[in-house]
Amino acid sequence: MTSGKLFVFTGPSGTGKGTILGKVLQAEPRLRLSVSATTRSPRAGEQDGVHYWFMDQSTFEEKIEQNAFLEYACYVGNYYGTPEQPVNDQLAAGYDVVLEIEVQGAMQIHQKRPDAVMVFVAPPSIAELENRLQGRGTEDAAKVAARLAQAQKELTYQNQFDYVIVNDVLDEAVADLRSILRAEHCRVSHTTTP
Ligand code: ADP
Ligand code: 5GP
């Protein structure tokens, strides 16, 4: 069986990454979402092992020491990281794997796995990003402000990605991501001799 492809899906908090991926994952049985580890507290409705692996800081730091993460970063005061083994296992089993991660982690993947397909999701505007973050209601005003400040930095990395999707009309953004998955499976590899 041929290995699957690795996709990195990055963009400011509140842009709609999770919403887009939820729809694409339903439509694409060959695609698997990597479950990240984090030290942030679960939001209402979030389940351990489904949305994240929730852990305390010392457990996370032990896993850093053990080299258990493909990448990790500190984002607005908490650690977030991608456990490496499940990603490798799913790829070897022939599934495509998508990492929904922030920009520092995305850049680490770009270095370590140059074949990874890098996709950035941008909001239509900063004002709309603020509306979405406030509308989601999962962070207080101070945390929304910290995430918006981080968003301004993250947006400057767009041109280092293979694709940029502007999430204005949700269905169009979903179609864009599905088109990217499809196109990447038609891509000719120039690194192997025929
Ligand atoms: P992220 O995963 O990037 O942090 P979410 O998927 O949680 O973002 O989306 C943030 C908020 O914006 C949610 O309340 C979601 O319903 C809303 N949202 C997502 N995409 C759109 C869109 N295209 N138009 C309007 N609202 C959207
Ligand atoms: P949230 O707290 O909103 O779930 O996530 C905050 C940010 O962390 C988002 O941009 C999300 O994509 C990112 N993130 C989630 N998991 C990981 C991960 O494993 N590694 C990195 N680097 N970022 C992650």
Image (spheres, rainbow, N blue to C red):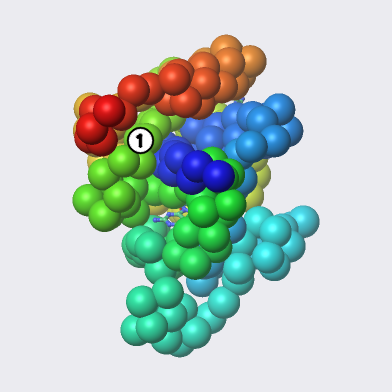
Residue at horizontal 47 percent and vertical 25 percent from the top: 185
Residue at 39% x, 32% y: name it: 119
User: In the picture shown, does residue 30 fall above or below 173?
Assistant: below
Query: What amino acid is labelled 1 in the image?
Result: Met
Q: Quadrant of residue 161?
A: top left
- Number of residues whose C-alpha sits closer than 10 Å to that of mark 1, classed few (under 14), some (14–19) or many (20 or more): many
Mark 1 lies within 8 Å of ligand 2 (Cβ measured): no
**Left of 57 or right of it: where is 73?**
left
The reply, left or right, for residue 69 in relation to residue 181 is: left
Q: Position of residue 113 (x, y in %)?
A: 30, 50
Query: Residue 162 occupies which quadrant of the picture?
Result: top left
Quadrant the C terminus occupies: top left
Q: Residue at x 49, y 32 (%)?
A: 15
Residue 19 point in image, percent of width and height:
63, 33
Number of marks in picture: 1
Q: Which residue is mark 1?
A: 118
Q: Is residue 121 visible?
A: yes
Quadrant where the N terminus sits is top right
- Viewed as shown, does residue 86 lie left or right of 136? left
Residue 158 versus residue 62 in the image, above or below = above
